[in-house]
Image (cartoon, helix red, strand yellow):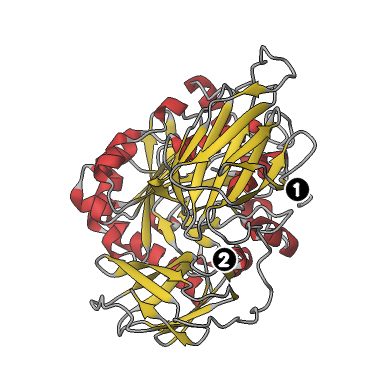
Amino acid sequence: MTQDQNEPVSGARRALNRRTVLTTMGALPVIAATASVLGASEAAAATAVIDPSARRQTIRGFGGMAFASWIGDLTAAQRDTAFGTGEGRLGFSVLRIPVPENQADWGRDLATAKRAIELGAIVFASPWNPPASMVETFTRGSQTDAKRLKYGSYGAYAQHLNDFTTYMRNNGVNLYAISIQNEPDYAHTWTWWTPAEILRFLRENAGSIGTRVIAPESFQYLKNISDPILNDPVALANVDVIGAHLYGTQFSNFPYPLFKQKGAGKELWMTEVYHPNSSDSADLWPQALDVGEHIHRAMVDAEFQMYVWWYIRRGYGPMREDGQISKRGAMMAHFARFVRPGYVRIDATANPASNVYVSAYRGGDSKVVIVAVNKGTSAVSQQFTVANSAVSGASSWLTDASRNVAPQGAVNVSNGSLVVTLPARSVTTFVADLGDGPTPTPTPTPTATPTPTPTPGTGPRVAYTMSPWNNGFTANISITNTGTSAINGWTLVFTLPSGQSLTSGWNAVYTSSGGQVSARNVGHNGTLAPGATIDIGFQATHTGNTAEPAAFTLNGIPCTVA
């Protein structure tokens, strides 16, 4: 995407822009809420059954794009609004940045990326063009100045991506992943790639890239761009994430059976969209409810693990130009603030009533998050029943015409189920406790290390799961409080075996010195109740040694390793 294709500063637009293309292709229409025959009365819905045992995709996060060279950088306050998790924050846990073709521009998004990581987010990057010396022009239909990467420069381009990764790491930002090309199939003002060219680069060169690799980031989730990757074992081995954009993609094209068949061990990310358009104000209501449904469909129908908006701060984006959260942003915050990285989507009755959309997510801390979108013009009486479990307490947050993610306090719990009213044209997030711990409330990321509370009795339990590949690996760490008192603020310390080096992490703030790694809690997981479990993770490189750490301590207390 280019500046003049998306609400440019000057207001000028090129004759060819994405909205023009999508109009001719049949863009996704704005879905209007249909009037209920019950008028303003409260309609009854079928019971929505939540099944924590039916686990679907693991959620990597929700976020947006920063592009300082096109629209200016976020301010310090705007960074905190975007990536903080407390009231009045978006709760983003993902930042996407560009890979500039010129090294002189590599630092432009650094400040925002560093703050995002400090607040517990992951950062990934996408290139629009290789360095000019690696590009040649050719004729593509009526375009006589189309650009493509020279085949003889494939190796140099892989090194260019590695060099950017190294630059960011040396400046305090460990990239979680890097893409090989933004929208290779919609490149009128950047670099085109054919499916065959993508396949060749992945087979011959992507294996040398030292972090996770994303491809192909098709602008409309066109499967003819990604199918060849999934059908080629060599190319697939060098890809970690199948990335896609959803511009004008019909809901019927959201599912991806071939990925479910052949994508084992890979991740599926939605890495860019604005919806339903970039021409209307993000505060237009009830149109903003379309964003709530769109995220629901991306999670439930497409089973994406990530959802990333285009510009974070824009008139049509989650944050207005004045730094305030928009109605579209509130839709995102209903997911981002509460469905944190590492949560798993679980089965839920997706459409218990007309115009009502429900999705549910389970954390490692006995919490269940339910997001309910009611696009109808009538309130709906809704019951949520959690299979094989009982809700002991819950709280809720609401967005409607006059409120944005407003806390609503405790929720009525009857016979272990939530019994609620979903107001007309609203989104509600419910955070339910399935154990004996307190009802969760998101809190801002602390600015200082909290005072640790020692855990009496048996030491904490750690389970460590590694997923290695040729020169790197990811590791998931589950931490369980086996004591009888809550842990308020924690730091996990361990030493990586020889040849292993930390590159990035999630759900904690990581620091490393030599081989020793310290992982400190972020705002949303600072309290670990007795018997509760939280999941954190990281990515690292290795030189052949894939051994696991021998020991862990939590707040200085030796852990039991499961």
Element type at mark 1:
loop
Q: In the image, residue 61 lies at what x, y percent? A: 51, 53
Residue shown at the point (33%, 79%) measured from the top left: 500
Q: In which quadrant will I find the C terminus?
A: bottom left
Give the residue pinned by disc 1: 321
Instruction: Determine whether label 1 and label 2 are within 8 Å by CB.
Output: no
Indicate the position of residue 182 as horizontal and vertical percent values.
45, 47
Q: What amino acid type is highlighted by mark number 1?
A: Glu
Q: Which residue is mark 2?
A: 525
What numbered label is drawn on residue 425? none
Left or right position of 366 against 265: right
The quarter holding residue 428 reads: top right
Q: Residues within 10 Å of mark 1 (few under 14, many from 20)?
A: some
In this rendering, is residue 89 above or below 539? Answer: above
Tell me if residue 401 comes above or below residue 238 in the rendering.
above
- Viewed as shown, does residue 401 lie left or right of 137? right
**Kind of residue indicated by mark 2:** Asn
From this view, report whether residue 242 is shown above or below residue 533: above
